Structure formats: structure tokens, C-alpha cells
Amino acid sequence: MIEGLNPNQLVPVNGTVPKAAGARKTAGEMSFNAVLEANLQKDAGLKFSAHAQERLASRQIALSTQDLQRIEGGVDKAAAKGARESLVVKDDTAFVVSITNRTVITAVDANSMRGNVFTNIDSAVIV
């Protein structure tokens, strides 16, 4: 974690970021990993849109804590590669996830996946 940075604060991409002891450092001088780490810690959890919650219920998809951890791990990997919208596939279930917002947009079970075309994604992660 970056010293002197509130974990609930976004790190500006172009601007200044507080440094320990009140000194200032431009974001251009920060490593990409430091900026990414700060932003990931802000929203470390995974959110589910209302649509995704409806799909989980209607398709009777249950997720354990371990399942959520696997999906979050996939989201972390996609974020590290610069993905914005990703298809995260876990066993026989697929999730379209906004990597930027860390929000599951929809969930699709194996039966619904057949013949389906997933659009508006820039990456896929198998977890």
C-alpha cells in the first residue's frame, strides 16, 4: 500500500499523489503496479448488478465463498492485463464482468451458454 494514501481514495492517473511526510510525487513517477494496487484495494470486493442477481436467482446458480474468490482472482488477472470487460468462466458458469467497476453484469449457466455469442468483451479468463 502507498504510504499517506487513503485506501478509499482514487489515485489520479495524471496529477499528484501524496507521499509520506507531505511530499508530493506525480503519478507519472509512480509505478503502474503501485497505482493498480491502490485502485484495487479501493474496491477489493466484487459487486453484482441487479441484472446479474436476477440471472443468478432465475438460473438457480449458487456461489460459495470459494467460488467468489476464484471469480475475484480472475478479475484481478484481467485487471492486471488492462482488460475492461471480461468473460470469466468458472466450471460450467460464465460471468460477464466490468473489470473497471469490479461488477458482475450477468451470469450464464451451461444450458444458456450453448449457441450464445458474448459481445462487448475484450478478454476471457478461465478460473
Image: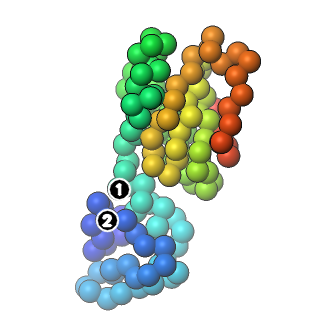
Q: Residue 90 location, x and y as percent?
A: 57, 25
Res. 81 mark: none
Per the image, label 2 sits on a secondary structure element best described as loop
Q: Position of residue 85 (x, y in %)?
A: 59, 45
Work out whether residue 66 can be spotted.
no
Please report the residue visible at 57 percent of the width from the left and 54 percent of the height from the top. 80
Residue at image position (57%, 21%) is: 108
Q: Residues within 10 Å of mark 1 (few under 14, many from 20)?
A: some
Kindly check if marks 2 and 1 are in contact, taking CB atoms under 8 A apart as contact: yes
In space, the residues marked 2 and 1 are separated at their CA atoms by: 7 Å
Q: Is 8 on the left or on the right of 70, as rendered?
A: left
Quarter occupied by residue 39 = bottom left
Q: Which residue is mark 2?
A: 9
Query: Of label 2 and label 1, which has the lower sequence position?
Result: 2
Q: Is residue 74 above or below residue 92?
A: below
Q: Which residue is mark 1?
A: 42
Secondary structure of the residue carrying numbered label 1: helix
Q: Quadrant of the C terminus?
A: top right
**Quick check: 124 left or right of 43?**
right
- Determine whether, in the image, residue 67 is placed left or right of residue 111: left
* Frontmost residue, 30 versus 84: 84
Where residue 124 sits, quadrant-wise, is top right
Q: Position of residue 57 (x, y in %)?
A: 41, 16
The structure residue drawn at horizontal position 72% and vertical position 28%, both measured from the top left corner, is: 117
Q: Who is closer to the viewer here, 14 or 91? A: 14
Q: Measuring 44% from the left and 29% from the top, which residue is drawn there?
A: 51
Three-letter amino acid code of the residue under disc 1: Lys
